[in-house]
Image: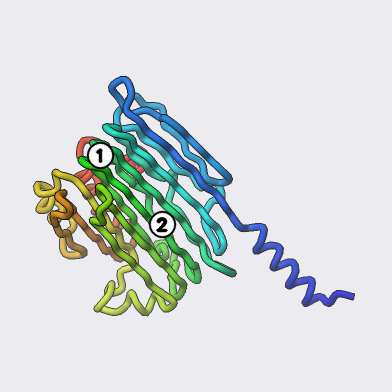
């Protein structure tokens, strides 16, 4: 005879196992007949990519996680390849939500590559982190000579307007960006297990729970530094370097909530993304 406790444990284990997501999608963009066009598209599992109907250049693609969010044990991978001279803007259909993890952690793997003279803007909407979640993201980008990339990631630890708080959990974010095979940017961000206490410290976030990092690798960064600083104001900062023969502008924003963050994030993305501006979904 099986005890009620044993049956409950088996049911819980089965429920956790059934929630696992293993999904990956890849999009390749090439320059053809005077404009950027879809070359290849691969989708597996809950990872989907949609292309809005438009004749504009750059090509715009929308990433969709059909699972509706991430939790412990989920694995999601996105790969974007932009060919020589091609231009693409990649965004998400909505904010990605990272829910409480009963076991393990959710992992997202992002791989970006841009050919010579190509341009890629990686502009997902905000990641919303819930209490007791566990999340790890890895972003790797390889840029050829003369390639340009704008990489943006924004994170909100609990929606203040909904009364949500993130007291504990684990969050890891790792970026590696190379140009012509040389490392031009590397960073590792980690917080947890006491997330709320860490962010409350004046030495870290001073109670602010919404933040964004923007990295622009381009030959046009010098003219953008001062306008970027004017948008950012006191809650954040921006710096400019020349690395491996190209310009690198790094900006960070901090805010008390997601709404306050987006009020400055939107004009900053518009500035750094040049004529391409914002993805249409950002303005809906």
Specify which label sits upstream in the sequence, 2 or 1.
Answer: 2
Check the image and name the residue furthest to the front: 181
| Local SS, label 2 | strand
**Of 206 and 23, the residue lying toward us:** 23
Q: How is the image coloured?
A: rainbow
| Local SS, label 1 | loop
Residue 97, x across and y down, in percent: 47, 57
Residue 154, x across and y down, in percent: 34, 57
Above or below: residue 35 compared with residue 41: above
Q: What residue is drawn where x is 45% and y is 67%?
A: 164
- The residue tagged 2 is 127
- The residue tagged 1 is 277
**Of 89 and 233, the residue lying toward us:** 89
Q: What residue is drawn where x is 31% and y is 48%?
A: 142
In the picture, the quarter occupied by the N terminus is bottom right
Residue 126, x across and y down, in percent: 38, 54
Check the image and name the residue furthest to the top: 33
**Of 91 and 185, the residue lying toward us:** 185
Distance from Cα at disc 2 to Cα at disc 1: 21 Å
Residue 179, x across and y down, in percent: 25, 49
Instruction: Say which quarter of the image contains residue 256.
Output: bottom left
Q: What residue is drawn where x is 33% and y is 50%?
A: 141
- 173 left or right of 107? left
Q: Residues within 10 Å of mark 1 (few under 14, many from 20)?
A: some
Above or below: residue 253 compared with residue 148: below
Task: In the rendered structure, find residue 51 and report the number of the disc placed on it.
Answer: none
Q: Mark 1 and mark 2 in contact (Cβ < 8 Å)?
A: no
Q: Residues within 10 Å of mark 2 (few under 14, many from 20)?
A: some
In the picture, the quarter occupied by the C terminus is top left
Is residue 53 at all visible to an observer of this figure?
yes
Q: What residue is drawn where x is 15% and y is 59%?
A: 239
Question: How many numbered circles are shown?
Answer: 2
């Amino acid at each position: 005879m099986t005890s009620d406790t044993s049956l409950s444990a088996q049911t819980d284990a089965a429920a956790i196992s059934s929630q696992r997501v293993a999904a990956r999608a890849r999009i390749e963009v090439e320059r053809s007949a005077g404009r950027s066009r879809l070359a290849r598209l691969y989708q597996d599992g809950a990872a989907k990519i949609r292309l809005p109907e438009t004749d504009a250049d750059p090509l715009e693609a929308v990433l969709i996680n059909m699972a509706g969010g991430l939790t412990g044990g989920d694995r999601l991978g996105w790969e974007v390849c932009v060919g020589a001279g091609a231009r693409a803007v990649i965004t998400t259909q909505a904010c990605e939500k990272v829910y409480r993890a009963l076991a393990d952690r959710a992992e997202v793997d992002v791989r970006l590559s841009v050919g010579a003279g190509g341009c890629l803007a990686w502009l997902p909407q905000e990641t919303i982190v819930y209490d007791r979640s566990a999340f790890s993201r890895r972003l790797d980008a390889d840029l050829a000579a003369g390639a340009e990339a704008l990489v943006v990631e924004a994170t909100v630890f609990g929606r203040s307007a909904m009364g949500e708080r993130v007291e504990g959990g684990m969050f890891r974010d790792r970026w590696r960006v190379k140009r012509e095979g040389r490392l031009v940017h590397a960073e590792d961000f980690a917080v947890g297990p006491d997330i709320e206490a860490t962010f409350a410290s004046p030495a870290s976030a001073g109670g602010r729970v919404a933040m964004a990092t923007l990295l622009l690798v381009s030959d046009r960064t010098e003219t953008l530094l001062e306008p970027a600083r004017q948008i950012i104001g006191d809650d954040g900062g921006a710096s400019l370097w020349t690395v491996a023969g190209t310009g690198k502008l790094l900006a960070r924003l901090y805010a008390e909530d997601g709404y306050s963050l987006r009020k400055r994030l939107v004009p900053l993305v518009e500035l750094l993304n040049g004529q391409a501006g914002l993805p249409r979904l950002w303005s809906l």
